[in-house]
Amino acid sequence: MKKLTEFLKKPHLPWVIHKRLKRLKNAYFFYRNQVANLKRKHGTEISIVFICGYHGDTGGTIAIASIANLLSRYYSVSFCSYLASNYNRKLSSRVKITRGHLPESDIYICDASCDHRTLQAMRASGRNIIVSCHGLPDELHGMEPAYLRQTLNLATRVHFVNEIQQRAFQLDENKVAIIPNTSAAIPKTRTTNNIGTVGNLDEPRKGAAETISAGLLSYADEIHLWSTSSDHWSLDSPDRVKPHHWENDKQKIYNSFDVLVFMSTQETFGLVVIEAMSAGVPCVLRRLPAFEAYADCPGVVLIDSQTPEELAEIINGLLQHKDDYRKTMREFFDAHYSGEAILREWQSLIQSLLTAQEVSDSGH
């Protein structure tokens, strides 16, 4: 009866209504972007068009939207989209959302699920295509491995976010550019005694159950789960476990807790880690090959043990000393994952493709 009472106290929207509201919100941002770009005139900047086959709410779409937003500071960037696309909420007004015909462009950036006919037509006309891949050969993308391989074969250059992908795919090094993801720095303005985890937590591989088990043994006041569509997490401890739906306001997320506990079993990058880093939030991570790049960051602890008691001890230590890591974590983020640092790497890649194109054209 107590569990039922706690459930009824919370407001619940039917999933169908929640989905429709999200689509309406996406449509609003689509039209807002159209209005913002009505009078905007693009000069002689290098043009870049994004074409993506998948428009859902995942870390991959957040990462690609971040690339588009970043490049729009320096280039003329367009993004092929539609009214209900989740990308509409993630794109800056500097990125021109287009639908219908494919705009002419100097560079095309596609996701790994992009339609092969589109890619083949662009390659046949000599276009420069960067395919941004965020998965592994057989995992983390929801596609047939053969389809993914063909996508990468059609690319002029393949963008990976981590060296582990290059080792897994074993592509020619001249075809690959490894550039980490980036995130807008998140200004944390609230201090708590809470822990949290972020991601599609309805997927077991994200490790929410492990986070909760350790968190309940720790001194944390609350355990925040961003994001999940399920309320079952909080039934046993509603006073401490706080599930939330998907949230686009990153400041709201990272203001709710002071230590990120991310026990995912499989990642190629871990966007939530650099988000937490930018906010100066210490992190406890399962030791994965993809997370080795974060080992040198103060406040990041990689853990091999899956014992809740040991994990709880580490959580307690980071909660106690959380303020000591704020400055150094933000400095590490600025040096390695900030927009300025990652923009330089993208500029180098784009310039190398344009230079190769000029050499090829002059040869004809």
Image: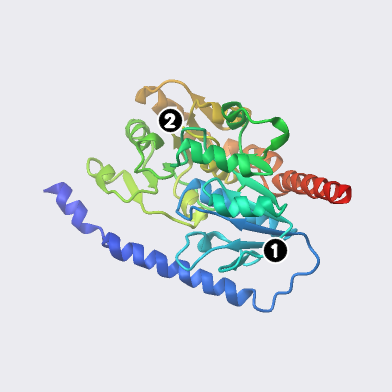
**Residue 326 or 168: which is nearer the viewer?**
168
Regarding mark 2 in the picture, which secondary structure is present there? loop
Task: Residue 103: name its quadrant.
Answer: bottom right
Crowding near the residue tagged with mark 1, few <14, some 14–19, many ≥20 C-alpha atoms within 10 Å: few
Residue 249 coordinates in the image, percent (x, y): 49, 57
Which residue is depicted at the point 38% across and 45% down? 225
Mark 1 in CB contact with mark 2 (< 8 angstroms): no
277 is higher (above) or lower (below) than 170: below
Which residue is depicted at the point 41% across and 26% down? 311
Regarding mark 1 in the picture, which secondary structure is present there? loop
Looking at marks 1 and 2 on the same chain, the residue that comes earlier in the sequence is marked by: 1
Report the residue marked by disc 2: 265
Crowding near the residue tagged with mark 2, few <14, some 14–19, many ≥20 C-alpha atoms within 10 Å: few
Residue type, mark 2 in image = Thr
Residue type, mark 1 in image = Glu
Q: CA distance from mark 1 to mark 2?
A: 41 Å
Task: Residue 209: name its quadrant.
Answer: top left
Report the residue marked by disc 1: 104
Residue 110 coordinates in the image, percent (x, y): 60, 51
**Residue 332 or 93: which is nearer the viewer?**
93
